[in-house]
Amino acid sequence: MKKICLSIVASTICLYSFAQNVSFETAQHIASNFLSFHKNTPFQKSLTLTLRDSYIRAENGETYYYILNFEEGGYAIVSGDYKTHPILAYSSDNNFDFSNIPSALQMWLDGYENHIKTIKETQQSATENIAKKWNDILNNKQQPMQKSIEKKGPLTTSEWNQDKYYNAYCPEDKNVTGEIGGEYDNHVPNGCVAVSMAQIMYYHRFPTTGTGSNSYVSPYGRLSANFGATTYDYNAMSDVATGYSHSLAQLISHCGIAVEMNYAPTGSGSHSTKARQALIGYFKYANTATFEKKESITDSLWLVKIKNNIDNKLPIIYSGNKQGASAGHAWLCDGYDFVDDTTVYLHFNWGWGVNKNGWYLSSEMGGFTVDQDAIFGLIPSTLPSACSNDTLTATYGSFYSGTPVQDYNNNADCSWLISSPNATKIKISAPIFSTELGNDIVTIYAGNNTSSPVVAILSGDTVNDKSIFEVDGAEALITFTSNESITNRGFVFTYTTTLSKSNYCNTNVNPGSISVIKESSGTLTNGSGNNNYDNDNSCYWRIEPTGATGFWINVTEFNLAPGDELSIYAHSGKVIQAITYSDRIARYTIENPPTGILTSPNQPQIYIMFRSDNDKNDKGWKLQWGTDVSICNNTAGITTLNTYPNPCNNLLNVTFETDETINSVKLHIKDLTGKNIQTFNQMNINNNHYSQELNLSDLAGGIYILTLTTNKGSINRKIIVQ
């Protein structure tokens, strides 16, 4: 029987042809040694890594793999059997979130499990090459030249997801888990194909405008997008969404509509072939892009295609469909690591946040044995122009030195002014930075001109992607100049801001407070007067007059920017954090402005929420409200009386209910001296509900008394005519 021995510190493990589980201690040793080596340069000492947490995939006494996270950052997925590659996947930076694994990654992990299960069941023997890999890592025999024969990537820096902020323009569904501010924000997931497409477009920052339009009937009704009439503002997007962004949500939504996404509360899907068609047909990508299936060529040629794309700085939309499954998944492949002739890792951006992005072993390609596809050659039909002088006003955003597929230009002279109103601090980072050392220079100024204090002067490849450059204030100027020779990849900068408390409405629900209003009628605004409201702000009001049994709301002024919304919720006794999509009775946006008077009967309180996104603003809104109030100890036989809008202009609506039959009803309008001004004799009657619209256009502005008289008695209500 063939035997291969591995020495582990002072012990020896001999691998026979039968299955043998890797112990947890050995897996931890393997992961720590491997990551310590990959987190350092050859000139640094090895790190001692501290285990943070772990996950073990085992069943019926057989261990298939371990996932181990470390406090210093990074994770490794270690095989549970010595006869496979020791490291199935890894990241030197990110930790792995066990609690929220996307379907695509789970399918890939299932592929590793199936591969290891087959080896165990067929009692295969370990090869000498595999045994040497285990031995080298266990005994720290990895050499600097063993890191990679060739490694490139990851190309992308975005860490986008399918949930809150990213899905803000996808259909709403009360069946989606989450409260206001919950995981999915009561919107359906945006779909992996749409996220993959959008990240490609953000990477290239192309197109600025699309072409054509599309409309289709989804499970949520007709969805439409006019790509040719839309400007995509990549500067108002960033690698990670830290708040609502019209630009970001619109881009992902348009990608979904372009591929006619089948939206659903538990997951949204479309076919990857549609992504190629949409990127070419609607978003102006070169028609040389190809959709190819892995099954049609050899493994080696497949890897050559991947390598050629990455070498040309072109991320790939990768997709797979597990055997027997009816649906597949899409994600990005944006890097390769040829460790040796038999070991190749691919870098995957799963479109599910950052916590699982990493390098995954390609020789066990995740079990997508039936349908494994990729879109190659995704490049803009016209490359974006070189860097220019831009002003960025969003509360978070990004900018690029040019186009990622070409080096920046010689003799460049560019600037970007971050000018975010209400910001007290700007934090700037560079996930990608590579210029000619000493000659092609980026300068960061703490102000809006080159006379401002210098925060940093940057060049070369020395900028750490974790470095943060801080500017106190609302403005920062970044300039870039290059000389007449030698260029490089350039840079990507992202930034976030710290905002001061809003000058207008400042009742942000977390951790702020809610404005509580007890009056039975009144006027409410966003508070900015003649000024524009603040960006990236949320305000809440609770209106709860004593005895209220219903409300009317009349929005008299409405000027919002794209991405901002005014919503009204009605529910008895709930705190604001518990209000959900199901409680909402109105949502007003620039695309869906208010029309007419909103009524909400049988509600003792309402919540009003105003939310603005990270960029662009306007004057805001103004509304009037009034209430139905329970009436006690009256002689008219009336249980509720409502007048709206109050104050009013020409028309006043009067409604009331009664518990008993009323034989006659008259309405009188009197001045404050009691003099009768107008009388109305007719009422519209529906069972015990009475209503009438009164024309008061002949009255001068002022305060009047409305007297309602029935055969049982009378009751008075103050009204205001404007």
Image (cartoon, rainbow, N blue to C red):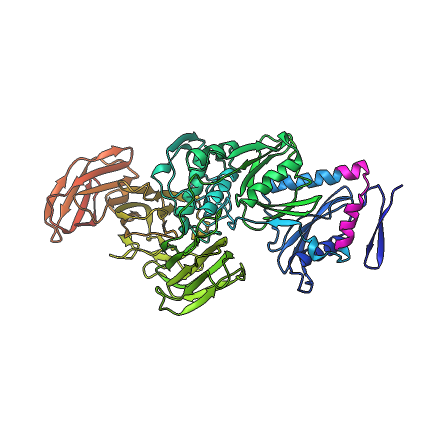
Judged left or right of residue 419, residue 494 is right
Q: Mark yes or no: residue 82 visible.
A: no
Membership of 123 in magenta stretch: yes
Q: Residue at x 24, y 56 (%)?
A: 530
**Residue 100 point in image, percent of width and height:** 59, 46
Q: Nearer the viewer, residue 120 or 602?
A: 120
Q: Nearer the viewer, residue 152 or 251?
A: 152
**Residue 549 point in image, percent of width and height:** 33, 46
Q: Nearer the viewer, residue 673 or 452?
A: 452
Membership of 357 in magenta stretch: no
Main secondary structure of the magenta stretch: helix
Q: Nearer the viewer, residue 65 or 641?
A: 65
**Residue 144 sits in which quadrant?**
bottom right
Judged left or right of residue 601, residue 173 is right
**Residue 309 point in image, percent of width and height:** 55, 41
Q: Which residues are magenta?
A: 118-137
**Residue 719 point in image, percent of width and height:** 19, 49
